[in-house]
Amino acid sequence: MVTQKDYILERQAGHLLRRAHQRHSLIFQEYIGDSQLTPLQFAALVKLRDLGEVSQNHLGRLTAMDAATMQGVIKRLAARGLIERRPDPNDRRRLILSLNKEGRKLIEFLIKKGGAITDQTLKPLTPAERKIFLDLLVKLARLNKVSG
Amino acid sequence: MVTQKDYILERQAGHLLRRAHQRHSLIFQEYIGDSQLTPLQFAALVKLRDLGEVSQNHLGRLTAMDAATMQGVIKRLAARGLIERRPDPNDRRRLILSLNKEGRKLIEFLIKKGGAITDQTLKPLTPAERKIFLDLLVKLARLNKVSG
DNA sequence: TATAGATTATTCGTGTACAAAAAAATCTTT
DNA sequence: AAAGATTTTTTTGTACACGAATAATCTATA
């Protein structure tokens, strides 16, 4: 044989994860209906809806965004007038975030489409396969850090 | 009940795909050993190794990058002196890409680590689960566009 | 063969993604 | 109480990611 080509890009987990995520992003954008709102902004709004008030860093940990990314996401949500930011009186390093009326209204409206987005993302699978896939994906999404 | 909270971010396919991909990126970075080389650059080099010569847009389709992203990736690979670019004499819109000696040497060296990266990415799963997961992921990565 | 339509590559603008570093506030330890 | 370490946020720099616009080229067909 001329060259060994037993490394097939199309069978690597990372490449496939990237493409599956890519496909999901397209579906999100199509189904969410709000061309301004991104998946990360949506995730931040959902968590703020669930928790009421959270510090910026804490929200970042809950939504798997690092501090710099969170900073940008929050800045844009605030610029759009969806969230409030106020310093924590008990720890003045912290910035406490919460939804305002506008933000609450928007996320309650948009979250109804969340189920359809996940359904459409998993549509190539049978119901049984969907459950299996999600269970396995949960294991692969856990950030069990290698060292530390 | 006060509020309906049946939408759990942590159970949505998109959020999980993003986090699994995130975890894979960390593993890639740790295992590849070359702090300059990114997953997309690696993918481009692998495909160039497999095919010899390809146009820039075609390489983008093969690696699931749009034209603008491809442009940036190729620019950086060329700046690092790993690939050659020449216009296609048969179609002067096209830019034909290929590895040079340096690029061939690098990818042949790095590709040996590719298997370990996929292994480590799938490590939370049993061997049987890995096969199932990859099979399902292939289905979800396919860009069967909704309309068109 | 003229021209409308498609393709290729580039550029611009916005939004993740994260490392690294800086600045302010807080906590720990002695 | 002060030094030293840690935490929170912000900023900077690089690299995806993709829509949209543009220029050059090619193709198909009227």
Image (cartoon, coloured by chain):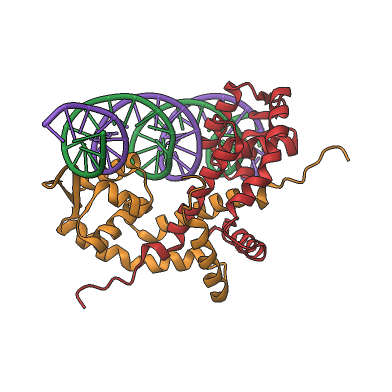
Chain colours: A red, B orange, C purple, D green
User: Residue at left 59%, top 31%?
Assistant: A34
Confirm whether residue A70 shows in the render: yes
Confirm whether residue A47 shows in the render: no
Q: Residue A28, image x and y in percent?
A: 57, 42
* Nearer the observer, A43 or D8: A43
* Nearer the observer, A26 or B125: A26
Give the answer, above or below, for where B67 lies relative to A77: below
Left/right of residue B117 with respect to residue C9 in the rendered view? right
Q: Residue B129, image x and y in percent?
A: 57, 72
Most extreme residue toward the bottom, as rendered?
A: A1
Give the answer, above or below, for where D4 lies relative to C3: below
**How many numbered tags mark residues here?**
0
User: Residue at left 67%, top 52%?
Assistant: B11
Quadrant location, the N terminus of chain B: top right
Location of residue A148 by image quarter? bottom right
Q: Residue B26, image x and y in percent?
A: 46, 54
Location of residue A4 by image quarter? bottom left
Q: Residue B4, image x and y in percent?
A: 81, 41
User: Residue at left 55%, top 32%?
Assistant: A73
